[in-house]
Amino acid sequence: MNGKLRLGILFGGRSGEHDVSLMSARSVLSVLDPNKYEIIPIGITQQGVWVCGTNSEGAGLLDALWERKTGGLTRVTLLPELGQSTLYAVHEKDGGERLEALANLDVIFPVLHGTFGEDGTVQGLFELADLAYVGANVLGSAVGMDKAMFKDVMRANVIPVVESICITRGEIEADIQGVIARAEGLAAYPLFTKPANLGSSVGITKCRNRSDLYEGLMEAAAYDRRVLVERGIVNAREIEVSVLGNDHPQASVPGEVRPSGDFYTYEAKYQDERSELVIPAPIPEETAGRIRELAVRAFQAIDGSGMARADFLLDPRTQEVFLGEINTIPGFTKISMYPKLWEASGLPYAGLIDRLVELAVERKADRDRTERRFRRGR
């Protein structure tokens, strides 16, 4: 493409990870080269309203979403129509609404985490609008987001995961004692309860006894209709790897997370500065190689594209490696593990974002090669 690339940065969202998204977006916006990009910041409120500032500066829009204020901001929307990669301003007029073309987008970077951003829903909108976007497609996003489905796909691909069961909110409400009995039949305590479709450790509980399990099930069910109960590994080491690419993905050096508490909670990730990120992870070279190989295989198994961070558990007693989850839109602050691992692998933060935009354009060109009409006689 000639000239500046019109790059939309989409952040905020309706999920429990709204604030994490704002932190990631602030970092991304701070390093984008204005000589390369015409930057168009787009925010989504916690009520799901899309808004845009009056100019290309994202700081004011970010501050407005932090403060839960949208006065003076312009409502915007994308239309789910072929070729409509136009961002429209929504104006109220004569009791109705009028659309006005605001900007044409070349690429959109969804710096969104959790439901309605990382789960394939917004990616579906981008597909309908025929818009290039950073990150995994609808399938990869949905499978990567749903912890229970992801584990099933990993088992089918002979990638080791920790034993787990999936329970619905309806089952918990109808017979929580029966659910507790099923969970206790999975493994001895500790157990972990997790919303199936959420990240940043929101809604996750480490359960050491039946009382904890009861509370953990109720907590997870508040965030999702499907809840995962997973065997806990005592004193597990948390190893993470960043993956980058489309058809030929590469894995970064592994890093180790040493949380300040029992496990890597939301507070440990974003509020408690005592947690440590050790890069490269102090593990044997053979183990590091296996983890990097599994990360790439998992990325390919969900048809990943662009980026992902693969999170592993290393059992210190047996030295077994288990894949915990894959994050198709990982945390993107300058101190987040995904960019730090690539920086340690030789790709700095700003260069990483440039590469992700290139991969989005590349994947869009590949999608455009797909025939959409049936040709008779072929």
Image: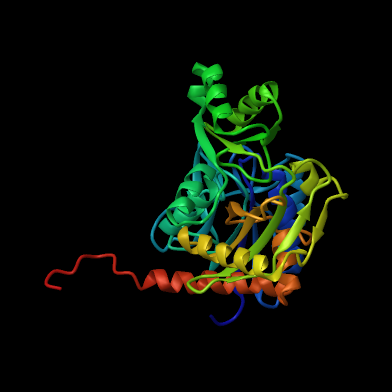
Image: 295 above or below 113? below
Q: Nearer the viewer, residue 93 or 162?
A: 162
Image: 54 above or below 288? above
Image: 187 above or below 267? above
Q: Nearer the viewer, residue 236 or 305?
A: 236
Residue 135 x %, y % = 55, 62
Residue 265 x %, y % = 74, 42
**Number of numbered tags placed on the structure image:** 0
Q: Nearer the viewer, residue 3 or 367?
A: 367
Quarter of the image with the C terminus in it: bottom left
Residue 61 x %, y % = 72, 51
- 47 horizontally vs 171: left or right: right
Query: Quadrant location of residue 190?
Result: top right
- 309 horizontally vs 119: left or right: right
Query: Quadrant location of residue 105?
Result: bottom right
Q: Residue at x 64, y 73 (%)?
A: 354
Can the viewer see residue 57 in this picture? no
Given the current orientation, which residue lies at the most extreme left position? Answer: 377
Query: How did the renderer colour the structure?
Result: rainbow
Q: Residue at x 56, y 46 (%)?
A: 91
Q: Residue at x 69, y 25 (%)?
A: 209
Given the current orientation, which residue lies at the most extreme right position? Answer: 274
Can the viewer see residue 21 in this picture? yes
- 330 horizontally vs 82: left or right: right
Given the current orientation, which residue lies at the most extreme front position? Answer: 318
Residue 19 x %, y % = 72, 45
Image: 121 above or below 375? above
Q: Nearer the viewer, residue 273 or 238?
A: 238
Q: Residue at x 46, y 47 (%)?
A: 152
